[in-house]
Amino acid sequence: MPVGAALAACGTSGPSPAGGGAASAGGGSANATYWYLSTQPQEGIRTASVERFNKANPTAGITPTTFQNDAYKTKIKTALGAGQAPTIIWGWGGGGLRTYVQSNQVDDLTPWLNENPAVKDRLFPSSFGAATIDGKIYALPCEAVQPVVLFYNKKCFEQIGAEPPTSWGDIMALVPKFNEAGIAPFSLGGQSRWTNMMWLEFLFDRVGGPEVFDAVFNAEKDAWSNPAAIDALTKVQDLVKADGFIKGFSSITADSNADQALLYTGKAAMMVHGVWTYGSMALDGGDFVSGGHLGYMNFPPVEGGKGDPSNTVGNPGQYLSIYSKATPEQKEIAKKFFATAVLSDEEVKMWTDTGSVPIVNGADKLLASSKDAEWLQFVYGIASNAKTFAQSWDQALSPTAAEVLLDNISQLFQLSITPEQYAANMNAVIGK
């Protein structure tokens, strides 16, 4: 599989103008437009890059607008269909980008990148996989590498006298111990659906290896019925039935960061989530991060499973495309923004300052001096040492299949369908 994009963080309700003065900087109809996701600290970094660009280009700037995750997905789809998309389209690559390409909605950036090799050569080579469709690059990778990891609250483990799990068996054994202590074993913002998906991504890999989802990605008939897939689906329902997740998880949203709050307040002991949550937990969690109470690790192996324990899921960056119907002037502004502002030295420092690893070659040299050096080096190691870094499912698949996927995952976690029913439902949309 191509190294993937995905599972982006999300936050306050949208849309809303970003950056105050930056929204109107540049004046005139020549302004390019740029939509991206809201949440702090990521939103602040994106907006600061736009503000710096507008200050350097006062007559031809960028007007930004922010949206929370689910609202953005709906809005960008509608805007593209109506011919009213922004000049710069923030996205996740993969299956969604493929649909844009098939509808001639985004420009081929390959010629421009060939003419500007310095732009391409400074980024992680692996980040271009989810930006490449049929051998051509339709998006510029940006921002930071974001694997999904298992976070845990050290105080909760101290309270019950236990060690972090080193296997799936350990996870299941910890569940009753935490429940007896009045602590939810795992936090989960299940209303958001994609948060549930991360569990299945890991379990499919740990049980059967990356080949199990590769078969789905490659549209092989009945791929979801693989025995390893049924085993993984069964295991996650076993965890639900054992009260492994906080009560009411299906009504908790990730957009509000409520799932993170459950972890840093000690109401839940563990959480499987993207590394982007580190910054917001550091920002909102009091001394949870600064006091050394946050633990983290790669998702543990499953006994007898075929997946390499180094494998991870998540994304090595996000992706910026140029709307094909933008004016020539707007497209030139976007390209100048790509070349001079995206992952500039100032932006790179902002990512590392908030506990993220930017996708710039040599970024590891910047990590040792950071206040979050231990965390950053952990993330860099997860990303660089993974034998397989799989693209998140809802981005690898087409938007049509992804919506069916998320609905069925939600039903699976609510125990309203069986693993076999899930597989049958998903087999019906393979390749669509």
Image: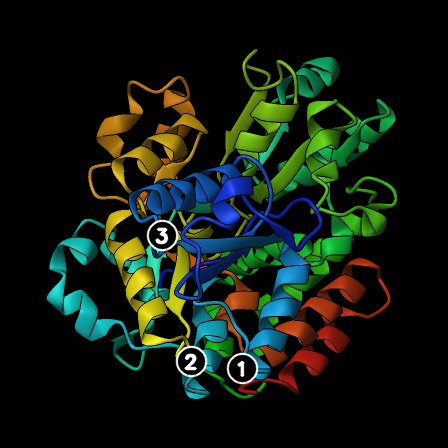
Q: Which residue is mark 2?
A: 325
Location of residue 412 in the rendering, given as x and y in whole percent from the top left corner: 77, 64
Residue extending farthest to the top is 291
Location of residue 353 in the rendering, given as x and y in whole percent from the top left corner: 40, 26
Label pair 2/1, CB-CB below 8 angstroms? yes
Q: State which tag comes first along the sequence, 2 or 1.
A: 1
Question: Which of the 4 image quarters holds residue 344?
Answer: top left
Residue drawn at point x = 37 percent, y = 75 percent: 327
Q: Nearer the viewer, residue 174 or 358?
A: 358
Q: Nearer the viewer, residue 120 or 300?
A: 120
Helix, strand or loop at mark 1 = loop
Amino acid type at image mark 1: Gly
Residue 402 versus residue 277 in the image, above or below: below
The label shown at residue 142 is 3
Q: Which residue is mark 1?
A: 83
Is 102 left, or right, of 289 in this rendering? left
Location of residue 133 in the rendering, given as x and y in whole percent from the top left corner: 34, 78
Count of marks, rendered view: 3
Disc 3/disc 2 C-alpha distance (Å): 22 Å
The answer to whether residue 257 of the structure is visible from this angle is yes
Q: Nearer the viewer, mark 3 or mark 2?
A: 2
Q: State which tag comes first along the sequence, 3 or 2.
A: 3
Q: Nearer the viewer, residue 338 or 70?
A: 338
Is 136 left, or right, of 187 in this rendering? left
Residue drawn at point x = 55 percent, y = 24 percent: 295
